[in-house]
Amino acid sequence: MDKFIINGGRKLNGTVTISGAKNATLALIPAALLASGTFRLSNTPDLRDVATMSSLLRSMGMRIDLKDHVLTLDTTGVNKHVAPYEHVKKMRASIYVLGPLVARYGRAKVSLPGGCAWGPRPVNLHIEGIRKLGADVKLERGYIVAKATRLAGAQIHFDVSSVGATGNVLMAAVLAKGTSVIDNAAIEPEIEALSGFLVKMGAKIDGIGTNRLEIEGVDDLHPADIDTIPDRIEAGTFLVAAAITGGSVTLDRIKPEHLSALTAKLLDAGCTINVESSRMKLQAPSAIRPVDVTATIYPGFPTDMQAQWIALMSIAKGTSIVTDTIYLDRFKHVPEMIRLGADIEMKENAAVVRGVAQLTGAKVMSTDLRASASLILAGLVAEGTTEVLRIYHIDRGYEAMETKLQSVGADIQRVAGDEF
Ligand code: EPZ
């Protein structure tokens, strides 16, 4: 397993081009199951999770090829409707095939995802939503087994705002007979991107971008091409990298409007930010001010930036409280941050972060994607050398992370090898 070796203390300066959004791509690929033919998804990020989703769909008969960030999908040969445990346990987003398979093929057998690094991740809303659309859904030996001759439009209300369940049920409803309404739908940009893709495929969806989606089911859909939105979490991670190192970094090919909650907090922390169309420049202050954050649903502060924010607050001039209301136990990065010298005390789903004058480099372990990002950010500013182990987690969601960081002056190297 590879590791990163980081020598801290360099201020980052320069320009980074942000890749396409992982969490949009992971919904767009399964959406192609809804129609037969060839699709082209441009600005697709070259990530492990995209490779995992691609290998799952290939096992179903889809032909998939990623070249120069254009993902070409050919769904004419799809002839299997199973998402086996081996795939789903690697990546929870594999469950996104459930809705399209039942809607187009009338059947699906999808493994339950199991837990992840930070605890249980239920899929009850996915299952209840597909059931409401008329599917017969059973749980058999760790699998979701769903059948339907033709799905029928329904009124669906999510008790909890869920990105995945919204995407899954939306992809099922577009081919159902009749009208569906999804209330309390997630409004994350990735769902808006999925909705736009489905409309390009011929779906009839009203209320895109709002938490009430009205879908007029159609009999069939056709292939479409789409340019994938930029990755707002990769962008946010690099903004924090500039802030934590006291540098000045410009991000290119982003959608600033997707980052408003984070940029507001970075301004409160003392950063200067200039925005022009698809570019954003952050100039760090000489000292970071402590800023409380509560991670919540979009357009609130994203839970996927919670770990990175803790890294930044660990060197702020004062104490801040970082709360996660989406995943109450998504704090596996905290013990590793403490090994780097951070002063953090957990109080249920809130981290009390007392800024320290200096972090000190150490060997630390990645536990999940965004935790890894926070450890890298801390390593960039820690005194001395930090080794971040098991960075296959990073490769799931950040394309060429070390190359991009090197391009703006970071002293970071990838060292290949087995368990260290
Ligand atoms: C998506 O996961 C993202 N992944 C996650 O990003 C992100 O953290 C999350 O949304 C929240 O924004 C992808 O898009 C592939 P949810 P998802 O369903 O869809 C509860 C990353 O780092 N819930 O919106 O799985 C759930 O427990 C990843 O890129 C149910 O109770 O998240 C959570 O508390 C990590 N029942 C809340 O909803 C369900 O059936 C939000 O989860 C489904 C979810």
Image (cartoon, rainbow, N blue to C red):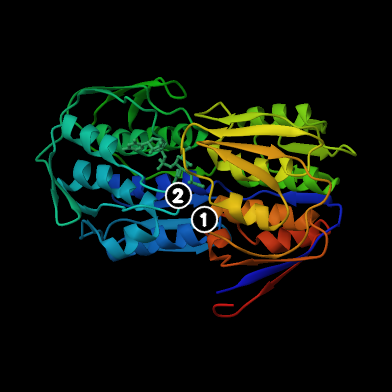
Distance from Cα at disc 2 to Cα at disc 1: 8 Å
- The residue lying at 47 percent from left, 43 percent from top is 329
Q: Is residue 137 left or right of residue 185?
A: left
- List the residue tagged with mark 1: 368
Residue extending furthest bottom?
Answer: 417
Quadrant hosting residue 253: top right
Name the one closer to the observer, 25 or 112.
Answer: 112
Please, is residue 159 above or below residue 350 in the view?
above
Q: Would you place residue 79 above or below residue 356 in this image?
A: below
Q: Residue at x 31, y 52 (%)?
A: 113
Q: Tell me the crowding category of disc 1: few under 14, some 14 to 19, or many 20 or more residues within 10 angstroms, Cα based.
A: many
Three-letter code for the amino acid on which mark 1 is drawn = Asp
In the picture, measured across the screen, residue 358 lies left or right of residue 262, that is right
Instruction: Tell me, yes or no, whether the two marked residues, 2 and 1, touch with CB atoms within 8 Å.
Output: yes
Residue 96 % position (x, y): 33, 46
Residue 193 in the image: above or below residue 210: below
Nearest to viewer (mark 2 / mark 1): 2
Q: Position of residue 214 (x, y in %)?
A: 32, 21
Residue at the image position 71 percent from the left and 26 percent from the top: 264
Amino acid, disc 2 = Trp
Give the x, y percent position of residue 388: 65, 65
In the rendered image, residue 13, in percent from the top left (x then y), is placed at 86, 51
Residue 219 showing in the rendered view: no
Q: Which mark is residue 118?
A: 2
Within the image, what quadrant is residue 211 found in?
A: top left
Q: Tell which circle, 2 or 1, labels the residue nearer the N-terminal end.
A: 2
Q: Which is nearer the eye, 8 or 167?
A: 8
Q: Quadrant of the N terminus?
A: bottom right
Specify whether tag 1 is near ligand 1 (CB below 8 Å).
yes
